[in-house]
Image (cartoon, rainbow, N blue to C red):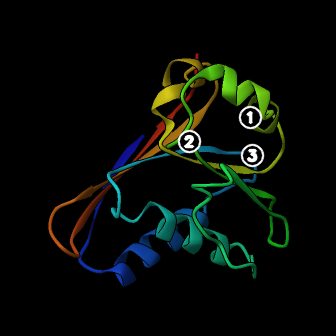
Amino acid sequence: MKSKHISNSPNDTVEIAKNFAKNLQGSETILLQGELGAGKTLFVKSVAKSLGCNDAVSSPTFTIMQTYSDGKFPLYHFDLYRIKNILELDNIGFFDYIEETGIKFIEWPEIILETITKISHIIITIKKLDKDKREIIIEENEGE
């Protein structure tokens, strides 16, 4: 299933994320694609807040992963921007987390696209159309 949404402001993006969060079951793997500043982390923050997470959600660019456990479901937020190869991911236990119960958000997932196709996942692509306007495409994939 694929859906497209237009966001004309950060507040619109928050609302789209809240609506998305209503359908989460607690074990989804969600890949976030989009250029720097597109709103990937805002989307994750909004979903986390909708699920009752009171922690301050931030981009894990330097830590690679943040874990939030005070909401309805455990939430794992990965940023793979600085990862060079699959071995690095294996060394930090990334693939173990993917098998955990909880919602897994993965920013900059390009390095794992070939391996992730084996499991059910959701791809969210956020395209910057102008300063505040975004196209948000949500696509569910069943896996192989």
Q: Nearer the viewer, residue 105 or 27?
A: 105
The amino acid type of the residue labelled 1 equals Phe
Secondary element under disc 1, as helix, strand or loop, is: helix
Q: Nearer the viewer, residue 142 or 128?
A: 128
- The residue that appears at 68% across and 54% down in the rendered structure is 63
Instruction: Measure how far apart labels 3 and 1 are at the Cα level.
Output: 15 Å
Please give the label number shown on residue 94: 1
Which residue position is annotated with label 2?
80
Which residue position is annotated with label 3?
27
Q: Nearer the viewer, mark 2 or mark 3?
A: 2
User: Is 106 situated left or right of 25 in this image?
Assistant: left
Secondary element under disc 3, as helix, strand or loop, is: loop
- The residue that appears at 58% across and 72% down in the rendered structure is 45
* Position above or below: 28 against 95: below
Instruction: Measure how far apart labels 1 and 2 are at the Cα level.
Output: 10 Å
- The residue that appears at 65% across and 57% down in the rendered structure is 24
Give the x, y percent position of residue 41. Answer: 50, 64
**Within 10 angstroms of label 2, few (less than 14), some, or many (20 or more) residues?**
many
The quarter of the displayed image where residue 89 is located: top right
Which comes before the other along the chain, label 3 or label 1? 3
Which comes before the other along the chain, label 2 or label 3? 3
The amino acid type of the residue labelled 3 equals Ser
Q: Quarter holding the C terminus?
A: top right
The amino acid type of the residue labelled 2 equals Leu
* Callout 2–callout 3 Cβ contact below 8 Å: no
* Callout 3–callout 1 Cβ contact below 8 Å: no
